[in-house]
Image (cartoon, grey):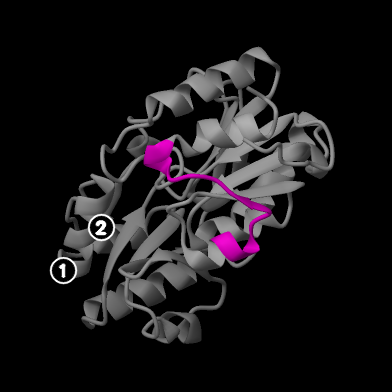
Amino acid sequence: MAIWNTPADIKAMFFDADGTLLSFKTHQVPETATMALTELKRRGVKCFLATGRPPYMLDEVSIDNLEAFITFNGQLCFSRDEVYIDEHMDPADIATVVDQVDKGLYNCAFFEKGRVYISGHDEHVNAIQQISHVDFPEGDIHQALENDIYQLNIFATPGNTSVVTNACKDVKLTRWIEHFVDVFPRHGGKHVAVRKTLEHYGIRPEEAVAFGDGGNDLTMFGVVGTAIAMGNGNEDVKEQADYVTDDVDRDGIYNACVRLGLL
């Protein structure tokens, strides 16, 4: 395999979960990806998870080789020793979304720090449950008016989300699949968390690599020295990446690390 050039010696790698570390086919981390992370850790490269998932939906990902965790698209970030980012959504925006759900405009999943509940199930919710192998329990969404919400999943297809952005004051929407969007504060996102994580660990951006496959990964591509898209990734992600590796199920992580000269 040809060696890929990087701007500096690599000291950190950030990995998205679904479609990057986690296979949509097996719902597991491929053995070769685990091998790669084990060797990276042995060589002193710090590996970070950077996902839209909450911590309680990551049972399939082993923490053994991971230094820290960017969850909720950067709203909650922590290492084994400390939490270094902990931010939730504006209660006024949550009230707006609850009102829109009550009016039947869409279904929505509300993510608290320790649990998630959804307004109901439809074809889009069912599709995501099947793809991600995650179940969304239905619950009284009015609980969200009293509790801190870190992220929303709004089940609206492309072209049908302006009702949210027009009514809310401080939200950002990202999408990696047609069925839903992740919603979190405007000032947040994976790129903000990656930048703060690098500062936290004293690592320069040019010494970092980010792997991703979906729209919510694009912002972190802009704050690292090298961006790598998975072969199974969205076309816009591939277009904006420095390099494209193989599919997650075809040893994409491992092969990329070989091309980077790390294995």
Residue 83, visible in the rendered structure: no
Query: In the rendered structure, which amino acid carries the disc numbered 1?
Result: Glu
Residues rendered magenta in the picture:
238-250
The CA span between labels 1 and 2 is 9 Å
SS assignment at label 2: helix
Say above or below: 77 vs 99. Answer: above
Residue 142, visible in the rendered structure: yes
Residue 207 figure quarter: top right
For the residues labelled 1 and 2, say whether their Cβ atoms are less than 8 Å apart.
no
Which of the two labelled residues, at mark 1 and mark 2, occupies the earlier sequence position?
1
Residue 29 percent across, percent down from the top left? 38, 31
- In the rendered image, the quadrant that contains the N terminus is top right
Residue 145 percent across, percent down from the top left? 36, 63
* Extreme-front residue of the structure: 1
- In the rendered image, the quadrant that contains the C terminus is top right
Query: Callout 1: 10 Å neighbours few (<14), some, many (20+)?
Result: few
Residue 46 figure quarter: top right
Q: Which mark is residue 123?
A: 1
Residue 34 percent across, percent down from the top left? 46, 23
Q: From the viewer's side, name the closer residue of 225 and 142.
A: 225
Q: Which residue is mark 2?
A: 128
Image position of 12 (left or right of 245): right
Say above or below: 162 vs 77. Answer: below
Residue 247 in the magenta stretch? The answer is yes
Query: Callout 2: 10 Å neighbours few (<14), some, many (20+)?
Result: some
Query: In the rendered structure, which amino acid carries the disc numbered 2?
Result: Ile
User: Who's the residue at 66% across and 54% down the image?
Assistant: 221
User: Who's the residue at 44% across and 85% down the image?
Assistant: 162
User: Who's the residue at 39% across and 61% down the image?
Assistant: 152
